[in-house]
Image (spheres, rainbow, N blue to C red):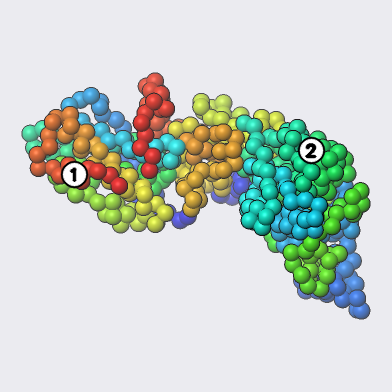
C-alpha cells in the first residue's frame, strides 16, 4: 500500500515521543486500543490548571505507520489548545491531514479516542466536569 | 549494496532465473507450435519440448514424465487434486483429512466440498506447526478417500513428516496428496519413497515463470484417477484440457532441472544465510521469537515475532527490504495470520511477525544490511511503544483491561 508523504514524514520523524509521570495531577493519560488488535496508543497531556490550556503533549504508540503518524499529529494539534478546543478535534480532520486510506481510518478513530481519554483522565483526577461535554467521551 | 530494496520474500514468489528465461524465449517466436498438432514439424518440436520439460520436472520428485499433469499453477493443482479425487471416488467415501495450516486454496476448496456434502477433518497442529502420523491415522475412517498435508508451510516454513504420513495412508489404502510448492528445490522429494499419490508444484516459487504449475498423478500402485475440473480437448490424459503453454512449460522444466542440479549447494547456502540472519537479529534483540519448528523447517525461511512492535509498522521502517507480515494490518480482514493462530501464537505476537524468505539470488552483503536495519528499526519502534515501556516497568500486559476495538 502506498503511503502519503505526510504519513511517512510523521513516521520517520515522530513528534513528541515520550512519557510524563502519570501520577502528576497536571497530567492526563489516555491509553486506548489493545495489543491483540495490533494497535495501542498512549497519549498524555500536561494541562495548566489556571488557564485550562494544554501546554505539552506526548505519545507512545504500538501500531502501523498510520497509527504512529495519527498519534504524532494529535500531539502537535493538542499543544496550545484549551481542553474545550481539544475535545473538538475530529478523526476526520486527521484522515484529511494525513491522507489516510480508507483501511486506515480506524487509526484516526483511535487517536480521537486517545485525545478524549486523556482529557477525561485529567478531569477525573481534578474532579472537573463543568463546561466539558462529558457525554461525548463515550467512544465509538 | 547492489540494489535496493532487498528482496527477502521468496516464499511469495521468486525472480525467474535468467537461464530459465533464455530457455523459454525461442518458444515464443521460433518454435511456437501447438504441442497437440500432430501433422507438422511445428507441433512435433513443441511436443518434444513439452516432453523434455515433463521429464525434467518428474526427475525432481522421483516420478515418471507421464505422471505430470500441467496446470495454471498450484492453486489449480490443489483444486484439481481435492475436487478431482472427491468426484471420482464419491462412491467409495466422502471424507477428507487435511490440516489447519494448509494454504488457502486447499482450505477453501475443502470448505466448498463440505458445502457439497463431503466431510473434512482439519487436523490441529502443535506449537511448532506439525501434525503427527498418529493424528492422521486416528482421523482416517472407512469413508476417507483422501489425505492432504502440505510438505512445508508457506508462512512459517515448518516441514511435515510426509514419509511417515504417506506410510499410514498406504496402510489404510487412502490416497495421499501433498502441496509441495514451498518444498521444491529445498527438500529432497521422492514420491515413491514418501508414499505420495498426488503432489502439487508451482514454477514461480522455484525460479520459473508465473502461470504454470503441475499436479503429479500416480500411474501405478495405485493408478490414481481424477474427475477433471476443466473440460475440453482431452489434453493431459483427459485430466486437464487446454492448449499447453509451451514457453511456460519449457521454463518450468528448466527451473526444475536447475533446482535439481544445484540442490546441495543451494540448500547449504540459503541455510547458512538464514542462520546468519536469524542469529544476527535474535541475538541482538531480546524478546524475539522464531515461529515454526526450530529445525524441521525450510532452509531459507525465518518467521520472527518482535514483541512490542507491530509488524506493518516495522515493515514501513524497513522499507528497503521486501518481506511480509502476519499482521492483520497487511490484509483487509483485520485478522492476524490463521497459521500463527493455529500454532497458538497470541494475536499480539502474530501482529508482530515478519516472514523472511531467503532465495537463490540473495547475497551475504544483503543479509548483513537487513540484519543491521531490522535491529535498528525494532529498537527505535520499541522506544516508541507504550507496551515496551510498560513491560520494562514490570507491568504484566495481560493484567490490563484492554478495550478491544
Identity of the residue drawn at 72% across and 44% down: B97
Gap in Å between the C-alphas at discs 1 and 2?
Answer: 61 Å
Question: In what element is the residue under mark 2?
Answer: helix
Locate residue A100 relative to residue B283 in the image: left or right. Answer: left
Coordinates of residue B135 in the picture (x, y in percent): 72, 34
Identity of the residue drawn at 77% across and 70% down: B231
User: Disc 2 marks which residue?
Assistant: B165
Chain identifier of the residue bearing label 2 in the image:
B
- Quarter of the image for residue B124 reads top right
On the question of residue B359 being in view, the answer is no
Which residue lies most toward the bottom here?
Answer: B39
Locate residue A15 relative to residue A129 in the image: left or right. Answer: right
Quarter of the rendering occupied by the C terminus of chain B = top left
Callout 1 crowding tier (Cα within 10 Å): few <14, some 14–19, many ≥20: few
Quarter of the rendering occupied by the N terminus of chain B = top right
Identity of the residue drawn at 81% across and 52% down: B92
Q: Is B4 in front, or is B377?
A: B377
Question: In what element is the residue under mark 1?
Answer: helix
Coordinates of residue A46 in the picture (x, y in percent): 19, 33
Locate residue B71 relative to residue A3 in the image: left or right. Answer: right
Q: Is B246 in front, or is B243?
A: B243
Identity of the residue drawn at 81% across and 47% down: B175
On the question of residue B243 being in view, the answer is yes
User: Disc 1 marks which residue?
Assistant: A135
Q: Is B55 in front, or is A34?
A: A34
Amino acid at each position: 500500500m502506498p503511503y502519503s508523504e505526510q504519513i511517512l514524514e510523521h513516521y520517520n520523524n515522530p513528534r513528541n515521543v515520550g512519557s510524563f509521570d502519570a501520577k502528576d495531577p497536571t497530567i492526563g493519560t489516555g491509553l486506548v486500543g489493545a495489543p491483540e488488535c495490533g494497535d495501542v496508543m498512549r497519549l498524555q497531556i500536561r494541562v495548566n490548571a489556571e488557564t485550562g490550556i494544554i501546554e505539552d503533549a506526548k505519545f507512545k504508540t504500538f501500531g502501523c505507520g498510520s497509527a504512529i503518524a495519527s498519534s504524532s499529529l494529535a500531539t502537535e494539534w493538542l499543544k496550545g489548545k484549551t481542553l474545550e478546543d481539544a475535545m473538538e478535534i475530529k478523526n476526520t480532520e486527521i484522515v484529511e491531514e494525513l491522507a489516510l486510506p480508507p483501511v486506515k481510518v480506524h487509526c484516526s478513530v483511535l487517536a480521537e479516542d486517545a485525545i478524549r481519554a486523556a482529557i477525561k483522565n485529567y478531569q477525573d483526577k481534578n474532579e472537573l466536569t463543568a463546561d466539558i461535554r462529558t457525554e461525548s467521551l463515550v467512544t465509538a | 549494496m547492489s540494489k535496493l530494496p532487498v528482496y527477502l520474500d521468496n516464499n511469495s514468489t521468486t525472480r525467474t532465473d535468467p537461464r530459465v528465461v533464455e530457455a523459454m524465449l525461442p518458444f515464443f517466436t521460433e518454435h511456437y507450435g501447438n504441442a497437440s498438432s500432430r501433422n507438422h514439424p511445428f507441433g512435433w518440436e513443441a511436443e518434444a519440448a513439452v516432453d523434455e520439460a515433463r521429464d525434467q520436472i518428474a526427475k525432481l520428485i522421483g516420478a515418471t514424465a507421464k505422471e505430470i499433469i500441467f496446470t495454471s499453477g498450484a492453486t489449480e493443482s490443489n483444486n484439481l487434486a481435492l475436487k478431482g479425487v472427491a468426484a471420482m471416488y464419491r462412491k467409495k467415501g466422502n471424507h477428507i483429512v487435511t490440516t489447519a495450516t494448509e494454504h488457502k486454496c486447499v482450505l477453501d476448496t475443502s470448505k466448498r466440498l463440505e458445502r457439497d456434502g463431503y466431510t473434512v477433518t482439519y487436523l490441529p497442529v502443535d506449537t511448532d506447526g506439525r501434525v503427527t502420523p498418529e493424528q492422521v491415522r486416528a482421523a482416517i475412517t472407512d469413508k476417507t478417500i483422501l489425505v492432504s498435508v502440505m510438505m512445508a508451510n508457506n508462512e512459517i516454513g515448518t516441514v511435515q513428516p510426509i514419509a511417515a504420513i504417506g506410510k499410514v495412508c498406504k496402510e489404510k489404502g487412502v490416497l495421499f496428496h501433498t502441496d509441495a510448492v514451498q518444498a521444491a528445490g529445498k527438500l529432497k522429494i521422492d514420491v515413491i519413497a514418501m508414499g505420495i499419490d498426488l503432489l502439487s508444484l508451482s514454477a514461480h516459487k522455484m525460479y520459473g515463470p508465473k502461470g504454470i504449475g503441475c499436479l503429479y498423478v500416480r500411474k501405478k500402485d495405485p493408478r490414481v484417477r481424477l474427475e477433471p475440473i476443466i473440460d475440453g480437448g482431452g489434453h493431459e490424459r483427459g485430466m486437464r484440457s487446454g492448449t499447453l503453454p509451451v514457453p511456460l512449460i519449457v521454463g518450468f522444466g528448466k527451473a526444475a532441472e536447475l533446482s535439481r542440479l544445484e540442490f546441495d549447494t543451494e540448500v547449504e547456502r540459503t541455510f547458512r544465510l538464514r542462520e546468519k540472519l536469524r542469529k544476527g537479529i535474535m541475538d541482538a534483540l531480546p524478546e524475539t521469537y522464531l515461529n515454526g519448528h526450530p529445525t524441521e523447517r525450510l532452509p531459507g525461511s525465518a518467521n520472527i515475532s518482535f514483541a512490542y512492535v507491530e509488524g506493518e509498522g516495522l515493515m514501513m521502517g524497513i522499507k528497503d527490504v521486501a518481506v511480509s507480515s502476519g499482521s492483520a494490518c497487511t490484509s483487509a480482514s483485520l485478522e492476524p495470520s490463521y497459521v500463527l493462530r493455529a500454532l497458538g501464537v497470541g494475536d499480539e505476537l502474530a501482529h508482530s511477525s515478519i516472514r523472511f524468505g531467503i532465495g537463490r539470488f540473495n547475497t551475504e552483503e544483503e543479509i548483513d544490511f537487513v540484519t543491521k536495519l531490522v535491529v535498528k528499526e525494532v529498537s527505535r519502534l520499541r522506544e516508541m511503544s507504550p507496551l515496551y515501556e510498560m513491560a520494562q516497568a514490570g507491568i504484566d500486559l495481560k493484567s490490563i483491561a484492554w478495550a478491544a476495538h
